[in-house]
Amino acid sequence: MKGDKETMLKMKGVNCKAEAAKARKNAAEADRISREPREKEDQKWKEAEVSKSRAAKKREEEAEKRAETAARKKEARRLAEQEEKDHERTLKNPVKKVTEAELQHQKEEQQAAILEETKRKQRRIAGEKEYKEMILVPNTNRRNNDSIIDANTIEEAIAQMTLKENNEHHEKKLIATQQGKKGNSLMRSLARDMKNDVW
């Protein structure tokens, strides 16, 4: 059928393929014409953006250069101030030359200080006899308290403990017998009273 249409159009003097090609060409031309102003507009905007970005880049580079120079100036100022302070210190406290005699004097002073320190340490170390005298000082705060055992050796402490235990037991026995005697006399008096019907 397709062939039939083409043959019919050919008979009328119209070439279908040529017409289709013309239509495509016209559509492409119309599209190009409508696209051209848009492309020109887009190109202008791109150029404007590029020019702006170039200017912005240039501004940024200038700002970086200014920041670098400012940092260098600041560092230079800081170094100058530090150098000035160091110079002032040297003027206030000049470096003094030391002679051999002064060095010898300083060594002697150090040796004397070391000798004094060793003497102090030796004074702190007491002999055995001196140590016992220092340790065996009686404590006068505890003299009146009988419950405290005051001994320097273990044997003395054991001896004092046995004496105290014997004394305490003896005292307890005495108290118990006295109470027993009182109790017995009380019982006797009660028994007498009951006999006499004093109640």
Image (cartoon, rainbow, N blue to C red):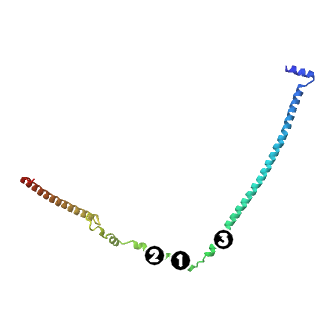
Q: Which of 127 and 137 is in front in this view?
A: 137
Farthest residue, direction bottom: 101
- Residue 95 horizontal/vertical position (percent): 61, 75
Residue plotted at (92% across, 22% down): 12
Count of numbered badges drawn on the protein: 3
Asked if marks 1 and 3 touch (Cβ < 8 Å), the reply is no
In front of the other: label 2 or label 3? Answer: 3
The three-letter amino acid code for the residue at tag 2 is Glu
Task: Indicate whether 35 appears above or below 170.
Answer: above
Q: How far apart are marks 2 and 1 (CA)?
A: 15 Å
Quadrant of the drawing holding the N terminus: top right
Residue highlighted by disc 1 = 106
Task: Indicate whether 191 appears above or below 128.
Answer: above
Residue plotted at (78% across, 53% down): 55
Whichever of callouts 2 and 1 sits on the residue coming sooner in the sequence is: 1
Whichever of callouts 2 and 3 sits on the residue coming sooner in the sequence is: 3
Whichever of callouts 1 and 3 sits on the residue coming sooner in the sequence is: 3
Residue 84, numbered circle: 3
Q: Distance between the residues labelled 1 and 3?
A: 33 Å
Residue plotted at (76% across, 55% down): 59
Residue highlighted by disc 2 = 116
Q: Quadrant of residue 43?
A: top right
The three-letter amino acid code for the residue at tag 3 is Glu
